[in-house]
Each structure stands twice: as structure tokens, then as C-alpha cells.
Amino acid sequence: MTSLLRKLCQIIDAVNEWTGRVVAWATAVVVVVVFVDVVMRYAFNTSFVFTQEMEWHLFSFIFLMGAGATLLKDGHVRVDIFYQRFNAKTRAWINLLGVVFFLLPGCYMIIATSFKFALNSFAIMEGSPDPGGVPFRFIVKSFIPAGFTLVFAQGIALGIRSFYAVIGKELETGESS
């Protein structure tokens, strides 16, 4: 059973690691898009709806799809005043309880409610209501359930690792970070 759970954690980690790399490239793209928008606005006194909408589409992609990779790297913001002073077993308990009672139910709720939202958007091939806007709004709406699915999966991996830490065993996954 341990080897199966180890393999599951490795797969989840690999998916979020790969997604994190894609998100890193998207961050470079958003810098270029914002630069173009600023130059067009201040140098040429013009702006395009497409460019402005592309900015928030890319920001949505970065934050939603990058959240699982951020959880993998333990990069989410938390109040560490007490947590950092606890021993590893206490931190594992906090992580396990947080995953089971908050992270997984919260992600499930968002996935369940946003899935229909994104599906309806795909069904009508929703685009921007603004002339000249991004024609593929349904894609950005699909990032909501997809991103929270990645966080949900990474939460499962965190929960498994935390459970093993609580019972006094390490679940080595070969993660390089």
C-alpha cells in the first residue's frame, strides 16, 4: 500500500511540477502583454480591449493553474507565528487536519459549482461581450475547475505525506525540492 501511495504522490507532484513550469512561461508572456499595453497606451495614446482582456485571462491562468504547484512547493501564505515553532509531527497534524477539513472540502465545493459554469460556457462557445475582446472566454472559465482540481490533487498528496508523518513514517517521493 505504501508503494502505491508513494507512486500516487509522485504522479500528482509531477503533474503540478509540469504545470508550474507552464505557468512560469505564462508569467513571461503576461509581462510582454502588459508591456505592449503600456507602450500602446502611453506612447501612442491608444489601447485595445483584446490586450486588456488577455492580461486578465493570463493572470487567471497563472493564479488558478499555478496554485497546485505553489502548494507542492509549500509557497502559500500562512500565519507562521506558531506553526514554525512546532515540531514536525505537530505540523503534520495541522496539515492533515487542514487538508481533510478545509482544503479538500473547499476545493470540492468550488470544482462542483464551477464545473457546470465552465461547461455552459463551452456549450455556447462564450466569447467576450466587448467588440475586439478575446473570443475564447470559455477557456478562461475552464481554468477554475481545472486549477482547483490540481490543488485538490496536491492536497491529497499533502494529506498522504502528513498522515505518514503523523504515524512516524516518512513517505519518500524522490521530490527534488
Image: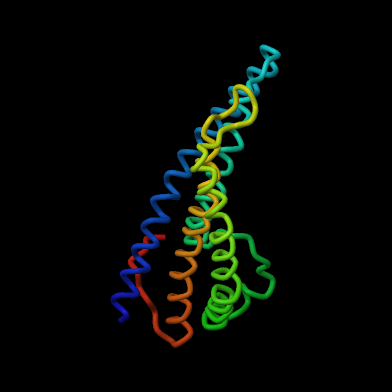
The residue that appears at 55% across and 81% down in the rendered structure is 93
Which of the 4 image quadrants contains residue 10?
bottom left
Is residue 123 or residue 160 the one in the foreground? 123
Horizontal and vertical percent for residue 44? 67, 12
**Is residue 102 left or right of 149 when viewed as pictured?**
right
Report the residue at 54% width, 66% height from top: 108
Q: State the residue lying farthest toward the top.
A: 44
Q: Nearer the viewer, residue 133 or 52?
A: 133
Above-or-below relation of 131 to 114: above
Q: Nearer the viewer, residue 147 or 89?
A: 147
The quadrant where residue 109 appears? bottom right
On screen, residue 41 versus residue 160, left or right, reads right
Q: Position of residue 140 (x, y in %)?
A: 54, 42
Say if 89 sits above or below 110 in the image: below
**Which residue is at a point 67% across and 13% down the rendered structure image?**
43
Q: Tag count in the figure?
A: 0
Quadrant that contains the N terminus: bottom left
Name the residue nearer the viewer: 44 or 126: 126
Q: In the picture, which quadrant includes the C terminus?
A: bottom left
Question: How far from the left and from the top, in percent, is residue 13?
Answer: 39, 61
| Residue furthest out toward the bottom | 167
Is residue 84 positioned above or below 142 on the image? below
In the rendered image, the residue lying farthest to the front is 124
From the viewer's perspective, is 72 left or right of 53?
A: left
Q: Residue at x 52, y 61 (%)?
A: 71
Q: Position of residue 170 (x, y in %)?
A: 39, 79
- How is the rendered protein coloured? rainbow
